Image: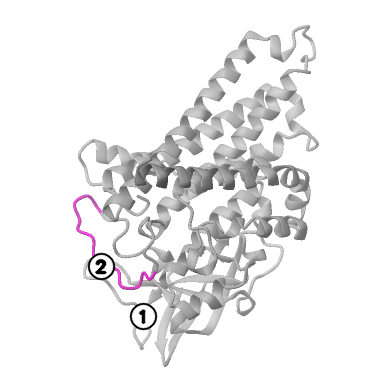
Amino acid sequence: MTPTETHGSARAEVSQEWIARAHALKPLLEAAAPRIEATCSLPADVLDALHEAKMFRMLLPRSLGGAELDLATYAQVVAVIAEGDGSVAWCIGQNSGCSMAAAYLEPDAARDVFGDPRAVVAWGFSLGPHCRAVPVEGGWMVNGSWGFGSGNRHSQWLGAHCQQCDAAGTPLKHPDGRVTERTMLLPRVSAKIPGDQWDVIGLRGTGSDTYSVTDLYVPAKYSLVPRAVGRDQQLAAGVKTEPEPERREKGTLYRITTMNVYQCGFASVGIGIARATLAAFIALATRKTPSGTTLSLRDDNWIQSRVAQCEAKLSAANAWLVQLAREAWNECEATGEVGFELRIRLRLASTFAIHQAREVVDTAYTEAGTTSIFQSNPFERRMRDMHTVSQQVQASVSHFQSVGQHFLGAAPSVRFI
């Protein structure tokens, strides 16, 4: 066996082991789903099991006790978790992306934030231009509000994406006019988090709260590049990679942009929800004969065709996403970066996967008839969760437009590529 084959075999064994961990958690997550939704958070027993399986440490550096998994394995694990519960998978996807911040922190700061085996970091979107960091002696004075902080209720630290200002409080700008940004990490206890604000139809268990701080001092060592995305990421076609002095971890994972990680992770949440919904419908079809008919769902030619089409949509979308994740990893391992053409296709595959997953869930929900509307059955919550996944930024149709612009020879926006 060649060194390359040996390396590939070892990676496959690691991948199988982590996917098996996720499968082992599914019964617990399925049983806990009603409690997760009712409390808008992950219960203690669920968190204990997730931490025992190290689900929040998949993308953490090995130097901090993390797994530093490859992108394809990570995506497959998230999909299996989502089969158990969508909110749990979404939290893992968000918190895992945030954990990549460790690659940009000084070693002692990284240990402070991630040293505890149960350490979790969450962050959300900046809510307006008032999110600012002003330099002061030894660090930054931070003000602002951030929304959609998924998983913050089981996190110890939060991230605050800020406009970087001068001492007078004026935002600094890049040569091209873009405002300079940095992310600040701060203890969750230092933020103001109003209660009872996460009132949504789906992914309720994520507890994606809004949080804010006023005149909070953050030491310089807890400051890093925006959203853990370095200067050599999300580049346009043909733009030369710049040195990234703040990246302290040199592994392949940390040469892949967190945007690619979020793409794969959140698309996999949709895939997992759809897989579970289709499985539930197939189980229903073996025992249900719709009112007013004598033909069971299983024996209905229309239903047979619909099930086959759903399986094709879901399997094809998932296989394409996983394959591109493998290609991205291999290319990054060989060249030090993921090329623009591959980033474009990964953007397309992840957005496409969410839309295909939604179609599968909608089909199962519709064909299950009135069975779907009862909370005691496994359809209505997953339908709500799936439609919540498809409403967020990773599923935006604007991504199809950006990819189409590239294929047609125009210059697309690279914000989400």
| Vertical comparison of 166 with 253: above or below | below
Amino acid type assigned to the residue bearing label 2 in the image: Pro
Judging from the image, what secondary structure is the residue with disc 1 in?
A: loop
Residue 72, given in percent of the width and then of the height, sits at 46, 44
Q: Residue at x 70, y 33 (%)?
A: 379
Foreground residue among 402 and 127? 402
Q: Is residue 384 magenta?
A: no
Number of other residues with Cα within 10 Å of mark 1, as a class: few under 14, some 14 to 19, many 20 or more: many
Q: Main secondary structure of the magenta part?
A: loop
Residue 51, given in percent of the width and then of the height, sits at 66, 60
Residue 374, given in percent of the width and then of the height, sits at 78, 34
Asked if one can make out residue 96 in the rendered structure from this viewpoint, the answer is yes
Residue under label 1, please give it. 165
Asked if one can make out residue 368 in the rendered structure from this viewpoint, the answer is no
Nearest to viewer (mark 1 / mark 2):
2
Where on the picture, by quarter, is residue 399? top left
Amino acid type assigned to the residue bearing label 1 in the image: Cys
- Specify the quadrant that holds the N terminus: top left
What residue range appears in magenta? Answer: 236-248
Residue under label 2, please give it. 243
Where on the picture, by quarter, is residue 288? top right
Foreground residue among 58 and 40? 58
Judging from the image, what secondary structure is the residue with disc 2 in?
A: loop
Q: How far apart are marks 1 and 2 (CA)?
A: 23 Å
